[in-house]
Image (cartoon, helix red, strand yellow):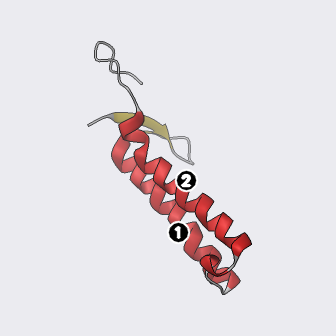
């Protein structure tokens, strides 16, 4: 497990598992997809220009999920 220090919206410093933090960000990003579809009243996959927005949102979510496996940690100095 890799722990990171984050600052929340209130300025408080928190320690959180990197995997959990990235999963949380990915889920928040995915929720934007559903909120946008709900707001527009149409599936983003139904229109070619909206499909591009959908693909970007899903790509960002996937990249967020992969961050923990893409970080190389120096074994001598475990700080990121």
**Lateral position of residue 18 relative to residue 12, left or right:** left
> Where does the image place residue 50, in percent across and percent down from the top left?
69, 72
Quarter placement of the N terminus: top left
Q: Quadrant of residue 53?
A: bottom right
User: How packed is label 1: few (under 14 Cα within 10 Å), some, or many (20 or more)?
Assistant: few
**Is residue 59 placed above or below 36 in the rendered structure?**
above
Which residue of the protein is positioned furthest toward the bottom in this rendering? 41
Question: Is 75 in front, or is 66?
Answer: 66
Residue positioned 35% across, 45% down in the render: 19
For label 1, the residue is: 31
Which residue of the protein is positioned furthest toward the left in this rendering? 1
User: How packed is label 2: few (under 14 Cα within 10 Å), some, or many (20 or more)?
Assistant: some
For label 2, the residue is: 60
Quarter placement of the C terminus: top left
**Lateral position of residue 51 relative to residue 59, left or right:** right
Secondary structure beneath label 1: helix
**Is residue 75 placed above or below 43 in the rendered structure?**
above
| Disc 1 to disc 2, C-alpha distance | 12 Å
> Where does the image place residue 63, in percent across and percent down from the top left?
49, 48
**Lateral position of residue 2 relative to residue 35, left or right:** left
Q: How many marks?
A: 2
Tell me if I can see residue 16 in this picture.
Answer: no
Secondary structure beneath label 2: helix
Q: Quadrant of residue 38?
A: bottom right
> Where does the image place residue 9, in percent across and percent down from the top left?
57, 48
Residue positioned 59% across, 63% down in the render: 55
**Is residue 46 placed above or below 48 in the rendered structure?**
below
Question: Is 10 in front, or is 34?
Answer: 34
Residue positioned 38% across, 21% down in the render: 79
Which residue of the protein is positioned furthest toward the top in this rendering? 76
Residue positioned 32% across, 20% down in the render: 78
């Amino acid at each position: 497990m890799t722990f990171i220090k984050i600052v929340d919206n209130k300025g408080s410093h928190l320690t959180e598992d990197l995997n959990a933090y990235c999963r949380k960000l990915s889920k928040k990003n995915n929720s934007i997809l559903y909120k946008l579809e709900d707001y527009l009243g149409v599936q983003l996959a139904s229109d070619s220009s909206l499909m591009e927005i959908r693909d970007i949102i899903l790509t960002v979510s996937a990249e967020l999920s992969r961050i923990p496996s893409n970080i190389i940690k120096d074994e001598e100095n475990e700080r990121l």
